[in-house]
Structure formats: structure tokens, C-alpha cells
Amino acid sequence: MQSDLNRVIEQVSKEKGMDRSVIIEALESAMLSAAKRTFGQKRVEAKFNPDIGEVELFEIKTVVAQVTDSETEIDRETARRTMDPEAEVDDELLSKLPAAAFGRIAAQVAKQSVIQKVCEAERELIYNEFKNRKGELFSGIVQRVEKKNIIVNLGRTDAVLPEKEQIPWERYRQGDRIRAYIVDVEMSHKGPQIILSRTHPGFLIKLFEQEAPEVYEGIVEIKGAAREPGSRAKIAVHSTDQDVDPVGACVGMKGTRVQAVVQELRGERVDIVPWTQDAAEYVCRALLPAKVSKIILDEDDHAMEVIVPDDQLSLAIGKKGQNVRLASRLTGWKLDVRSEAEVEVEHSRALAQLSSIAGLGAMTAELLYQNGFKSPEEVATADLDTLIEIEGIGPEKASAVLQAAQDHLEAQARAIEEQPLVEEVLELPATEELEAAAQE
């Protein structure tokens, strides 16, 4: 039995991947807890003896001049006679308690306590191992499916792949091997909860790291990724070495690398976009294969108006808006894609409205339009300093334009107020008609 405990410690240490000291500490703590149930108020200490493979229990007594508590104290004369011939007051003396005195019930309590503490230590060990592995790619075996959530065995523990983190139309059976991205690790009362994802943009990035050595080594950087899982994705790539083509490195010879990623993503189409610091150029590249005619940038709202040829509009927007949506997520800019014909119609309408302001010439109307003003209302409510800053207008002209626009709005308001009175007069019956009606 003595050697059995050493063997058990060794076995548990190997199976659970835990340090022997953790298990021994759990044993000592469990035995001490159970001993207190048996020996009541006595001061007891537990110590594992590896030579005999046993947790030994010791009773602790303090040497005093006069005993007030016989459970925890002993007088000096008795201590010198029975325990230590050199005992002095305030010394703490230990005497081994017989194993038989421990009792079967206390031993059972100790066993349960050991099991609990080993489980707690194992949970803590697993949590500490995985908490720093968020953002890594992991491979496991499908154990079972619970309410559409897939339970995956990662070796030492199980993880969960929630339904929302699964690629649409993807199906797995028990025993299938699965690769996923660790998106979160949290500790709960049941132990560590490891959340996996196959829809996270990070999963796409990690797949390219596996397939392209240049990405893994940092020669090619993936600056961003956007996905609509199972359908389409975009990644932005940049090379730190001018001799290395970032797109070619990700595509691979005859497309082998990107095809391996696409296969893992169940046919999800992946667009590889060369990254650039120029925001407008970056957006143009992100919208490929559509061609862009012009971009109007609004840095305050972090938005861009993207103008494309009429025959490129559907290509730029993509199926159900997918292409522009992904481009917006990838670049971080709000994008409004419009056709040249639509912009031309708006241009003509805006110039007509602006030109209706008294004293406003065609050139001034064009300048206002180019600076974002599309109606008299927008001009009338504008800040004077904003109008002054428009190249070609200046302080004096800006004041005149602002006043003219405000006068225009006031004239419109008066016309609207007077219109009902005119309509009422027009609707009144003629005097002859009134007289004829009276005679009848």
C-alpha cells in the first residue's frame, strides 16, 4: 500500500501532465482536512513521506509553563519526559499519530477531497495552457453534436464550436477531424471553456500562414481580412521585401496555395488584394474586378463616394451587395458606389437648383457642387467660413452667396404661405352663379 501511493502519484502526474508537487500538496491538504474531522480541536500537520509512500499525520503541541488547553499545549516537564529531553517553553513539538486512529470514514473523505483537488488543479492547468493560445489554429476530433454545437476533442480537453461559428451548410460527423480557430478561452464553474470558430477572419489568416511560408515568416504581411463565410472573402497583403510578390506568394504555383485554403473553407472564394497606404487606391483595389472612374473622399465621416462606369456598377456592388460590403469591411471606409449616369443626373439637377438662386452664375454653382453643395437649402444653412474656404469664391462673394441663398429660401417660404389664399379665391363661385342658386 505504501508503494501504491507513490505509483498513483506518478501515474496521475503522467496522465494529467501535472507536477508531482501539485498532487502531493493536494494529498496533504485532503488528509489534513479529513484529520480535523477525526481529531477535532487538535493541531495537526500532514506531510507526505516518499520513502514509505505515505501521508503521515503529526500532532502539534506548544510547550508552556502551565497548561490551559490540553489539546494544544503540554507542560515542559512532561514534554521533556515523553517527547524531547531539551524541550523549552514556546517550542512546538510534533508527535506522529497512528494511522489506525484516522478512521475509515475520514480516509474516504480524504480520497474524495484528493479527487476534487486534482480535478481543480487539472482545470487550472488546462486553462493556463490555453488562455494564451487565443488566435491559434487547432486541430481536433469531433466527439458529438449538442443542440447544433459541435464538441471537439483537442487531446487534453474538449472545446465547443458553436453553430454561429460554423460555416453555413457545413456538416460533421462523430470521428471527423476538424480544424478551427481558438476565438476565446474562459473559466467557468465547469472548468475551462474553449470556444472555436471557422467563420472568424483570423481563421482565414492562419490558413494562409500554414500554406504560405512567406506569410508565416513575416515576409508577407496580411494587413486585413473580411469574410462572408462559405461564400466570399477578401484579404489585403503587403510584402516587406520588394523582391517578393505578396499576391503571388499567397496564390502559389498554379494556384495551389489559395486552392488549399478555398478547399478548407468549403469553396469560399478568396480575393487577394495588394495593400497600399493610399486610402483611395486601396479602395479601388478592394473593389476589383470592377473598375473605378472617380472617388470623392470625405475624411470627416471616413466615407468615400465611388463612381464607376455604368457597365461596372453591378460588378462593383456584387451579388446582393457582397463585393462592396466586403471591400468596406476590409478597408474600414464607408463606401457609396454609384454609376456615372446616376451622378450625371444628380449633377444636372443640383446645378439647376443652385442656379435658381438670384445672382448665382453657372461657374459659382459648379464650384458649390464640387464642394458638396447640392441645393439652395444646403447653401443657406452653411457656415460662412466654409464658403470662404472654397477656392474661387472668397470672403466678399461668400457673403453675397450666403445672403442670396437665404433670400431665396425666404421667398420660397412666402410663396408657399400665399399659395393657399390664392387657391381659396380661385375656388369661390362667381356672383351670377350665387344669385342663380338663390333663385332656385
Image: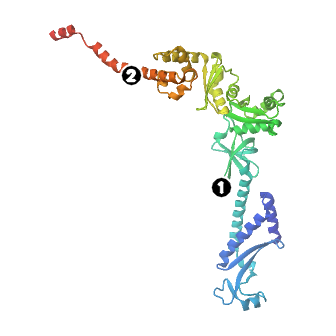
Question: Looking at the figure, which quarter contains the N terminus?
Answer: bottom right
204 and 8: which is toward the camera:
204
Residue 353 left/right relative to 318:
left
User: Looking at the picture, does residue 166 appear above or below residue 376?
Assistant: below
Of all residues, the one furthest to the left in this rendering is 439
Residue 368 percent coordinates (x, y): 54, 21
User: Looking at the picture, does residue 314 appear above or below residue 63?
Assistant: above
User: Looking at the picture, does residue 260 appear above or below residue 117?
Assistant: above
Res 228 seen here: no
Q: What mark, if any, has residue 190 been given in the picture?
A: 1
Residue 249 percent coordinates (x, y): 81, 31
Q: Are marks 2 and 1 in contact (CB under 8 Å)?
A: no
Residue 144's quadrant in the figure? top right
Residue that badge 2 annotates: 413
Marks 2 and 1, how far apart at CA? 70 Å
Identify which residue is drawn at 40% across, 22% down: 410
405 and 50: which is toward the camera:
405
Determine the secondary structure under disc 1: loop
- Single out the mark in the foreground, 2 or 1: 2
Residue 87 percent coordinates (x, y): 76, 87
